[in-house]
């Protein structure tokens, strides 16, 4: 997590993660620069992070009740865009940031989708 110290509070997510709280509706999300990249990196292809909360992975597409939902995780940084995913814990000051940067390969995978995507 690469954010200023004032944003490093965990908030309410542990209650969802441990199952003491459940999201009232299905929640599908992509990663950015304010998520715990070390945990999301374990779900490269996506998966359930808590009951009723689903992570689309580095790039992914799911169908839910007739809606096709696709997404691309990360933020763009030109000098990492053409690289592969090479980061692994423990992160250094460079990989702490590059781990959440969008890669061209992830965009390419989504370009292979045929048909319409309802939510992106």
Image: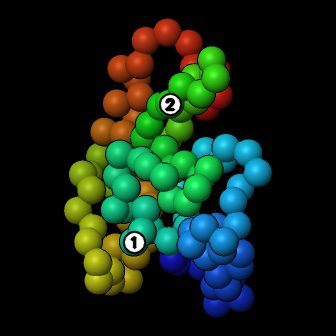
Residue drawn 54% across the image and 48% down it: 54
> Label 1: which residue?
38
* Element at label 2: strand
Relative depth, front residue between 43 and 14:
14
Give residue 59's position: percent from left, percent from top. 43, 41
* Element at label 1: helix
Q: Give the alpha-carbon distance from disc 2 to disc 1, as whole Å.
A: 23 Å
Give residue 48's position: percent from left, percent from top. 48, 52
Q: Dot 2, crowdedness within 10 Å: few (<14), some or many (≥20)?
A: some
Residue drawn 32% across the image and 80% down it: 91
Residue drawn 56% across the image and 72% down it: 18
Q: Dot 1, crowdedness within 10 Å: few (<14), some or many (≥20)?
A: some
Quadrant hosting residue 34 = bottom right
**In the rendered view, does 53 fall on the left or right side of 24?**
left
Relative depth, front residue between 5 and 83:
5
Quadrant for the C terminus, please: top right
Quadrant hosting residue 114 = top left
**Residue placed farthest to the bottom in the image?**
5
Relative depth, front residue between 34 and 84:
34
Residue drawn 73% across the image and 45% down it: 25
Q: Are marks 2 and 1 in contact (CB under 8 Å)?
A: no
**In the rendered view, does 87 fall on the left or right side of 50?**
left
Q: Earlier in the sequence, mark 2 or mark 1?
A: 1
Q: Which mark is residue 72?
A: none
Residue 2, above or below 53: below
**Residue placed farthest to the front in the image?**
20
> Label 2: which residue?
62
Please tell me whether mark 2 or mark 1 is closer to you in this view: 2
Can residue 65 be seen? yes
Give residue 19's position: percent from left, percent from top. 60, 67
Can residue 29 be seen? no
């Amino acid at each position: 997590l690469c954010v200023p110290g004032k944003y490093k509070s965990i908030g309410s997510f542990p209650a969802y993660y441990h199952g003491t709280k459940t999201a009232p509706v299905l929640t599908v999300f992509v990663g950015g620069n304010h998520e715990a990249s070390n945990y999301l990196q374990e779900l490269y292809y996506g998966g359930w992070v808590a009951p009723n909360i689903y992570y689309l992975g580095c790039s992914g597409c799911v169908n839910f009740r007739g809606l096709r939902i696709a997404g691309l995780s990360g933020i763009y940084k030109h000098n990492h865009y053409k690289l592969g995913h090479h980061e692994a814990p423990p992160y250094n000051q460079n990989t702490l940031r590059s781990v959440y940067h969008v890669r061209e390969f992830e965009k390419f995978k989504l370009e292979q989708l045929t048909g319409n995507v309802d939510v992106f």
